[in-house]
Every structure is written in structure tokens, then in C-alpha cells.
Amino acid sequence: MVSERLTPPMSETAATGPVVTRFAPSPTGYLHIGGARTALFNWLFARGRGGRFLLRIEDTDRARSTPEATAAILDGLAWLGLDWDGDAISQFARAPRHAEVAHQMLARGSAYKCFSSQEEIETFREAARADGRSTLYRSPWRDADPATHPDAPYVIRVKAPRDGVTVVHDRVQGDVTFRNEDLDDLVMLRSDGTPTYMLAVVVDDHDMGVTHVIRGDDHLNNAARQMLVYQGMGWDVPVWAHIPLIHGEDGKKLSKRHGAVGLEEYRAMGYPAFALRNYLARLGWSHGDDEIFTDAQAQEWFGLEGIGRAPARLDMKKLDSVSGRQIAMADDAALAKGLDDYLAATGQPALTLPQRDGLARAMPHLKERAKSFPEILEQARFVLAERPISPDPKAAAALDPVSRGILSELTPQLHHATWARDAIEAVVTRTAEAHGLKFGKIAPAMRAALSGRTVSPSVFDMMLVLGRDETLARLSDASQG
RNA sequence: GGCCCGUUCGUCUAUCGGUUAGGACAUCAGGUUUUCAACCUGAGAAGAGGGGUUCGACUCCCCUACGGGCUGCCA
């Protein structure tokens, strides 16, 4: 799935051309919900402008990268519905290209070989920290005469300007100015010849023709340092947009103790992908007072100017609400498909053909009262279960002798009724009134008889979905206790 | 320690110098009702603190506090 193929359309490399965004996760186990939102923003931005959305796996840290982790990320993105253009690119596979750039900078004089050992640097830092001085390492090899270079391992560092300032023109954070004296000569190529992340991102973003870099604001400082590499190569810098991270409900950095951090956990909880997209889009981005919207609207409305500058907290209650409203307006086929995925993702048995059929007929009534797939399933129990219906304790309590008597009286009355809501309702009401009761008094027993539960869709809706024969059979079953 | 970013109802946010500071979720009180959900009506709820600039600041500037990030031959 991951390849090193890279085909940047040259016409798209200029900032004036079509938009190209990318999502560049590290394969560290699973797709973080915050990462998923970052991906969503990039996807919305590109898709809303007829641009391209690319995917790159930042797997240069070999110790922490696994094929399984990469697969989990790809799977998560696919589930979320964020389709990317072309093949996912492996950053590691492009190491030779990164090294090539580092050597080009060496040749241009915008980089140099540094022979300082890691121990040497660490010793310096410890001392600096102890003295309360800056820990920025100033390599003595920066201006050394090549003739004095020892025959030893070295790293290639960028030769950053020491004077002046570097300004990151960020579309979210505004212009952020850094004094160059606060920026160090970052290592681009390690002593073993492998590239560092700082070099790799820049080279890859450039080669991929990325025009807009939308990423977490934990990279804002890095942007300044990366600009030195762009400048060293004489490349145009992309448009930056550093978005705030997502925090947990207590406002702290999102971590496992906050509950669901991985995207797959939301999938397993049964939130539809389209609902999660809506919720995530509203986290840190807004378009006036719009809360519930379609993908098409989100793509049309999404823009960098609507992104907030403060970190947003996850709010599960709001997610529930958004999900409920999205499910209510979703089309039945999409829900059925999502339900299949939910069942599979949680290791539950797939629906049988008759169950699918029943579910399809009941869906209009189910989707109006559910916030997630498990809730749809709960509401759908009446159509998924087969006779004899075994009521749960609370439902059984509703089937007391008196109620059963009324049900047995009702059953023959329904035999000849026209099977339409008005007609059925008239029969039921008439029967209830014959006992001096309002419909509300016998509804619980009917609900229990039809669904075996105390919570279900409307009894009339259930009767219509079930059909005359099945309805009468269930009422009869229940009345006979 | 140094550098950088952030701070409007409990939460997500609107506001882009002049508003009774709006909406949504949540909460509370009513209503509708056949359970649940939904829905309707209403209520309470906010500009971190302190200085400036200005006729006028949530909005611009400074300081403080708090939160976050970076400061690696991690990404």
C-alpha cells in the first residue's frame, strides 16, 4: 500500500496553481483523533478547491515504525472517508533523495559537516543548563577549513543565518517572528547517513508539490527552522496553517486517561463516519452559526480563516447530539452500510438476509431516535428478533393478566382492519375505550408484545413494518402468556 | 532556563472598535407525547487579572497569571 512512487505534477508546484495538501502521520500504533481532525482539515481544504490531498507516512524512525501501525492509519482514514490521491508515500523510502538534497546544500555552502560527537554536545548542554545559559549548540565546525576535517563520522547541519529574523507567515497564527540567533543549525543528515525529520518534511513537501501545510501547532516552532532549509535550497515556502491541538474534557493534553484517543475507538462505539466528520470539523473551525452540515457544505465552506487559535476540548455529549442529528438525516442505505461496518469492526455476527430486509423497512423509524449504531440496533430489536419474542423483565411486567386480556380481545379486531396507520389506530383506540382506557394505557403491553422491550419505535410503526400476520402472531403469543 | 503560541457562557464557538455580547451542546423549568429519542417554549450562564491607546474596547498595545508547544543525530 505504501510505495515510493512520487509523481508531482510540475504545474501544481506553484502556490498559484491548484491546491495540494497532505497528511503526514507517524506510524506509531493508531490514528489519533487529533490527527484524524488534521487529516480532515487538509482533506476539506483540498476537496473544496478541486485540489489534491496526499498521504505520506513519516516512517523514518525505524525503531518505532511498523507495517501494522501504517495499516491501522490507512484503515482509519479510509473508514473516516478521507480518500487520498495516488499512493501513500513512504518517507523512509525516499531517504536517498533526502541525502541528495543535504549534499546539494553542502555544495551550495548552505550546509556544513559537523564532527562534534553526541557525547561532546550532551556535555555542553548539561553544562549550559546548569549555568542557566542557552542550550543551543554552536558547532565549531561551521566555518572550519575542510582541510582540517578529520576522517571521522559527521552529520550535515544547515548553515542558518545568525543575524536577522525569520518570519513564519501563518494563516492561523498570524506572522510569527523568530530571531535567528535563537535558531540552531539543525542536523539534516545523521552520522549514519540517514535523514532527520526536519530535512525529510521539507524535501518531501517540496517534491510532492504541497502548496498548503495544515498541521498541528506543535510544529509552529519547527516551521521557522524548516524555512532555513527551504531558503538554503532556494525553494518557495508553502502556505503554513498551524492548527491548535485537541485537548481532553479537562483541558489537558489528550491522553489515554481521557478515554477514547484512537479513531478506531469511535468507530467501535458506533459513531458513523459522516457524523464524526461533522463533529470534528466543528472542533476548532466554524462557519458562522452552522452546526450540522453535509460534506458538500463543509467542503464549500471550509477555509483557513475559519480556524480558531485556541485548543478545543473533546465533548462527547456534543458528539452524541451531532451524531443523532446526522443519523436522522442520513439516507437509509448509507446507514445500513455503516451498520455492517460497525458489526464487523466490533466482531459481531453479520445480519442475515431477512434481518437486513426487516432493518431496511424499519430504518425510517429507527434513525430518528438513535445517536449511534448500537442504539439503532437496540431500537431495531423488534424487527431483528424472531418469534417467540422473549420479553425482558421490565417488558414482562407490562404483560400483566389484565393487559393480556385486552390484547387477546384486540387481536381478532385487527384481523379485518385495513393495514394502514389510521385504520389500525382507530381499532386500537376503540378497543381501549371499550375498557374505559386511553391508548396510553395499553401501549406498554403492545410494545412488550411486539418488541419484548419497554423501549422501541412507535407501536403503530412497528405494526406496519411487521405486517398483519407477524403482528397478530406476536400479540397472540403474548396474550396467551 | 530560553523561545513561541493561546485565554468569550461548564463545553464548541460568533463578533473582525460602537451589539441588550449571538448560536449550538449540556443544565434547569414548562409543553407535546405511546416508551425512548426527537420536537416546541422559557430560564440561568462568558470576554483570566491589571495597565494603556481611543470619543468608545471582547476586539489594538504592554505586563502578570494560567494553559500549551518547541528547545534531540524523535517525529
Image: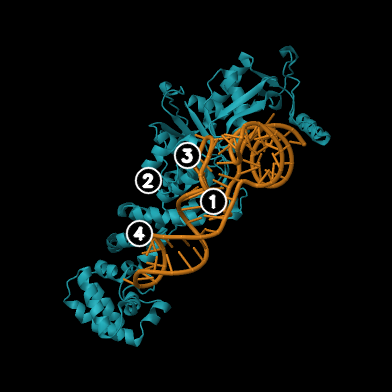
Could you give the CA–CA distance between mark 2 and mark 4, rounded to whole angstroms? Answer: 17 Å
- For the residues labelled 1 and 4, the Cα–Cα distance comes to 24 Å
Chain for mark 2? A
Looking at the picture, which amino acid does disc 3 mark?
Phe
A21 sits left or right of A152 in the view: left
Residue beneath disc 1: A314
Q: Which residue is mark 3?
A: A41
The residues bearing labels 2 and 1 have C-alpha atoms spaced at a distance of 21 Å
First along the sequence among labels 4 and 3: 3
Residue type at mark 2: give it. Thr
For the residue pair A375 and A244, the one nearer the viewer reads as A244
Along the viewing direction, whichever of A451 and B46 lies nearer the viewer? B46
The chain identifier of the residue carrying mark 3 reads A
Q: Amino acid at mark 4?
A: Lys
Q: Position of residue A259 (x, y in %)?
A: 56, 55
Quadrant of the snapshot with the N terminus of chain A: top left
**What secondary structure is marked by label 1?**
loop
Where residue A318 sits: x, y (%)?
48, 54
Which chain contains the residue that carries disc 4?
A
Q: Colour of chain B?
A: orange
| x and y, in percent, of residue B41 in the image | 41, 60
On the image, numbered disc 4 is attached to which residue? A367
N-terminal-most mark, 2 or 1 = 2
Instruction: From the viewer's perspective, tell me whether residue A295 is left or right of residue A361.
Output: right
CA neighbours of label 1 inside 10 A, class few (<14), some (14 to 19), many (20+): many
Q: Which residue is mark 2?
A: A294
> Chain A appears what colour?
cyan
Residue A52 locus on image (x, y percent)? 41, 32
Q: Amino acid at mark 1?
A: Leu
